[in-house]
Amino acid sequence: MRLSPAPLKLSRTPALLALVLPLAAALAFSDETLDKVPKSEGYCSRILRAQGTRREGYTEFSLRVEGDPDFYKPGTSYRVTLSAAPPSYFRGFTLIALKENREGDKEEDHAGTFQIIDEEETQFMSNCPVAVTESTPRRRTRIQVFWIAPPAGTGCVILKASIVQKRIIYFQDEGSLTKKLCEQDSTFDGVTDKPILDCCACGTAKYRLTFYGNWSEKTHPKDYPRRANHWSAIIGGSHSKNYVLWEYGGYASEGVKQVAELGSPVKMEEEIRQQSDEVLTVIKAKAQWPAWQPLNVRAAPSAEFSVDRTRHLMSFLTMMGPSPDWNVGLSAEDLCTKECGWVQKVVQDLIPWDAGTDSGVTYESPNKPTIPQEKIRPLTSLDHPQSPFYDPEGGSITQVARVVIERIARKGEQCNIVPDNVDDIVADLAPEEKDEDDTPETCIYSNWSPWSACSSSTCDKGKRMRQRMLKAQLDLSVPCPDTQDFQPCMGPGCSDEDGSTCTMSEWITWSPCSISCGTGMRSRERYVKQFPEDGSVCTLPTEETEKCTVNEECSPSSCLMTEWGEWDECSATCGMGMKKRHRMIKMSPADGSMCKAETSQAEKCMMPECHTIPCLLSPWSEWSDCSVTCGKGMRTRQRMLKSLAELGDCNEDLEQVEKCMLPECPIDCELTEWSQWSECNKSCGKGHVIRTRMIQMEPQFGGAPCPETVQRKKCRIRKCLRNPSIQKLRWREARESRRSEQLKEESEGEQFPGCRMRPWTAWSECTKLCGGGIQERYMTVKKRFKSSQFTSCKDKKEIRACNVHPC
């Protein structure tokens, strides 16, 4: 499946992409200035010339292109984010893409196209349709749009931003609101352009990744798979820039392919662990069945990992199941800042991407390998009309998940030149102090807020309060304690405690031992949470050291190992299984020998009873051909059981049978047997006799046509006499004879040996009007004599031809 962005009507000249962010409403703040713009120029150029109170070097607002590239690939989609660092915010913005050294008053001045991600946040500007602005003016700290890069030959572009806050318009000609991108050389075609700078941060940082799936029938109703929807186990790692797990424009490895198509992280983890020198932490989190549940029912999956100066990137992926090869994730997210510090928090909305290994277009498409393999690319709403994300207008795909990466601790000496604020430092050095209480495990709370100021400003007794938020109540039958806590207090200077007392935090964890073998030293730190009220110096120690021993019986053949990692998921989804955990060799033996320490451990694990686990089935195959070539038949289709046999019996049908109807089979003409030959039609001389047969079934649906139904043959009774007088005499005698016989029949019926017959009936109507038909007449027995022994006494039937003239 290939990405096909809408064609752009752009000339091949150097370009400037100016993402100018003054919202339309902001122009009302500078109408005087706009009036000075010549009326002949377009509204888009007036936006660029809008003036306001400028503040150069303002660092609370930033413009970022996903991956922080220095180059762009023509026709590729890039996610552009404008954000404000808390507590700052902005009310509006406008985005415009311009070629270099252009004013924006002509259509050909604009480069690339924008794509809306969230219609509640952004929209195209009515007076300047190539620009993007806010949908509603309100406080916001972050917006995102897609920008599709212009065609080859456009040259370098500059992403330039300005925003509106209250009645001030902030512009940025250089600095955090300016980003320069140049066109990628064709020799690098197909490779994700994500130049990564060397990290200058010191020490290490620990992060927590939390994955919030938002893929549900409510958000994505088209063809939503109700039965088997899920997110596969999350797999990833913190790594150096020398290792790539996956990237847009690159090809999926075998590990990525198995995650994308089967949801199996085993091969991917094996690939990551093979890069032990480039990887610091393997990131793993459990799968989610079903894909979405409220947070008060199931906590979002999370995993912790660490980064250091050389391995400061993190990547992960998880499969959207069922699907052909669709995933979400982050690739080479840099957690090191240019100021030599560690990023505090990353929040990223995720849309699915295609691994390029399967060509299916729906959630449950049958397997259809992509040969040759294609490059990894994001899905779009114009990929295929049958796609669940299809939008004929080319709108944005609604995000299916959100990932939050938050720093929870820093270890070792830090060297960032821009110090964090006090709250940031407090959050980093140690987790919140936990009061001992009897809170049930089924009640999930946030941390307590700081104590409020005392309600009394004098030495009279008052009270102070702290609060926490109930995040989830997993068992409604178990009550959860209050979310507020009160404590008696007095005004400043009236406390019974010594005014020179200082309040300290808890000790953070011990540092690693100073040596890798034998006895060394380790240290831990704490910080001052509250200085003495009397202004005196806090004399309590903020650092402790103690001896530590590593490998007491160490020798030149000893090796240094990392700590054990977390246990893997149980090998079984139900019943008894096995789980493993791993560690890596941190330092090989000094004498060059093989390290004999274990690098993996295994133990048994018990999962819920197997009957509670749903069957995991492949999609239905295509229907087989009908069992017949015409008329009514049967056809079948099959599916396979994906879950392991040891999980228990699966009672779901693996084969379906249904009736099928093809065009009717041909039916040939059917006829009766031939009748007896008729009497000769002449009493002397040459004549003919005929016989006939009837059509019982006309031919249908192309069957064989009916053959002849009348046959004739010649007959000759005797020669006719040539003397006319004698001939007439004989005719007269014959006529009188027949008349006398007829009178006799009418009086007493015809006499036969042993019986008396009724007279002949009249001839029936001819069966055809032309072409030869037949007539019939009957004679029935009137009386049988008792002495009769003749078998000839029975009903008689005569037949003759009629209407023999052609039709």
Image (spheres, grey):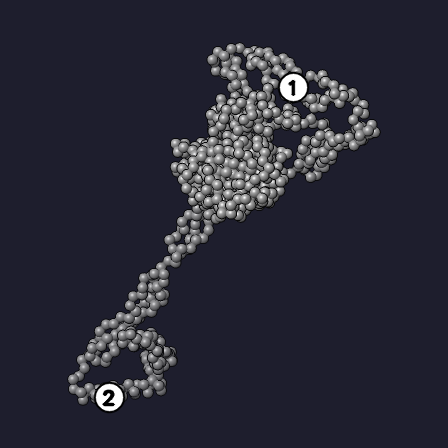
Q: Quadrant location of the N terminus? A: top left
Residue ID for mark 2: 732
Q: Earlier in the sequence, mark 1 or mark 2?
A: 1
Residue 226 percent across, percent down from the top left: 55, 44
**Numbered badge on residue 525:** 1
* Label 1 environment density (alpha carbons within 10 Å; few <14, some 14–19, many ≥20): many
Left or right: where 311 falls relative to 701: right
Residue 204 percent across, percent down from the top left: 57, 22
Residue 559 percent across, percent down from the top left: 52, 15
Q: Nearer the viewer, residue 345 or 399?
A: 345
* Label 2 environment density (alpha carbons within 10 Å; few <14, some 14–19, many ≥20): few
Residue at 30% of width from left, 77% of height from top?
802
Q: Vertical placement of 237 versus 778: above or below?
A: above
Q: Nearer the viewer, residue 468 or 194?
A: 194
From the image, state whether disc 1 or disc 2 is nearer to you.
1
Q: Nearer the viewer, residue 737 or 375?
A: 375
Under circle 1, the secondary element is strand
Does residue 320 appear in this view? no
What amino acid type should be assigned to the residue bearing mark 1?
Answer: Glu
